[in-house]
Amino acid sequence: MVLKKLFGGSERELLDLLRRHLALSKEAMMLFLRLIRAPGSLSLDELPRHRSIVIKLEKEGDRIYDTAVMQVLKGAFPLPLVADLGVLLDDFDDILDLIYFVNMELTRGIRVGLHRTRVVPEVYSLCARMAEKALEAIDSLEAILGSVTKSLAKASEEMARIDSIEDEVDEIKNEALEIIYERSKDLDVLTFTHLVEVVRSLDTVVDKIQDSSQELVRIFTAVYS
């Protein structure tokens, strides 16, 4: 009842936009996971197709983001919430932007044959685990979007799950970076930089998912209180 009074139903449209945006992030991350598990599965002629799909997802995400921003700015929400909602929208958009970036970085590395060099397969295996965890976190964020207007307790449980996933991803990230630095003598500058970029980007994806979950729960907790 409090929610209806403050939002006037606008929250349903906004949450739907966020769900659509998150679905694009999930699809882009699944594409990344499939490719990093089998980096030699696509020929040089097929890599542009992978890239074009990811680019299309990112552009669609930008359109959804712009629509959501306009909804917030046109006065559909109480003024005290506008700044917080702006942060929330930026966090969601950052998730997809980062997944776009890591897909592009992966395809660049594969295109020049980095996946066939020493150390890279070992680090890629850890990156695949990070991507799997990112997908789990996306599922939990999706669950928050579906439950935050109905049960803050359920939303808080999923937020805690994302916190736990983020801790696991940090551990995998540190393991991957240890391997990269310990065996840096076996890597040229391009390969070293490529691996660090992929690892850190995946870690930041999960950080942004965590930020989004906390912002969502915080906003709706404030609305209900």
Image (cartoon, rainbow, N blue to C red):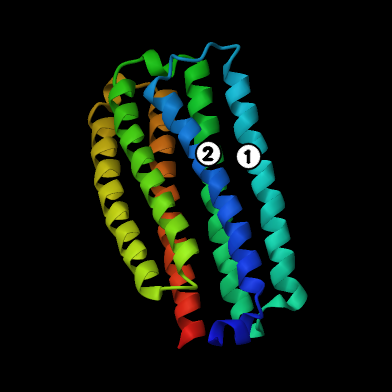
Q: Residue at x 45, y 75 (%)?
A: 218
Say which amino acid is labelled 1.
Answer: Leu
Residue 215 position in % (x across, y down): 47, 69
Indicate which disc residue 57 carries.
Answer: 1
Judge from the rendering whether residue 113 lies leftward or rightward of residue 6; answer left or right.
left
Residue 29 position in % (x across, y down): 48, 38
Determine the secondary structure under disc 2. helix
117 relative to 20, above or below: above
| Disc 2 to disc 1: CB gap under 8 Å | yes
Q: Residue furthest right?
A: 74
102 relative to 84, above or below: above
Residue 143 position in % (x across, y down): 43, 58
Determine the secondary structure under disc 1. helix
Q: CA distance from mark 2 to mark 1?
A: 8 Å
Quadrant containing the N terminus in the rendered view: bottom right
Quadrant containing the C terminus in the rendered view: bottom left
Closer to the chain start, of discs 2 and 1, is 2
* Closer to the camera in the image, 63 or 17: 17
* Closer to the camera in the image, 95 or 12: 12
Name the image quarter holding residue 41: top left
Q: Residue at x 27, y 57 (%)?
A: 164
Say which amino acid is labelled 2.
Answer: Glu
Residue annotated with mark 2: 27
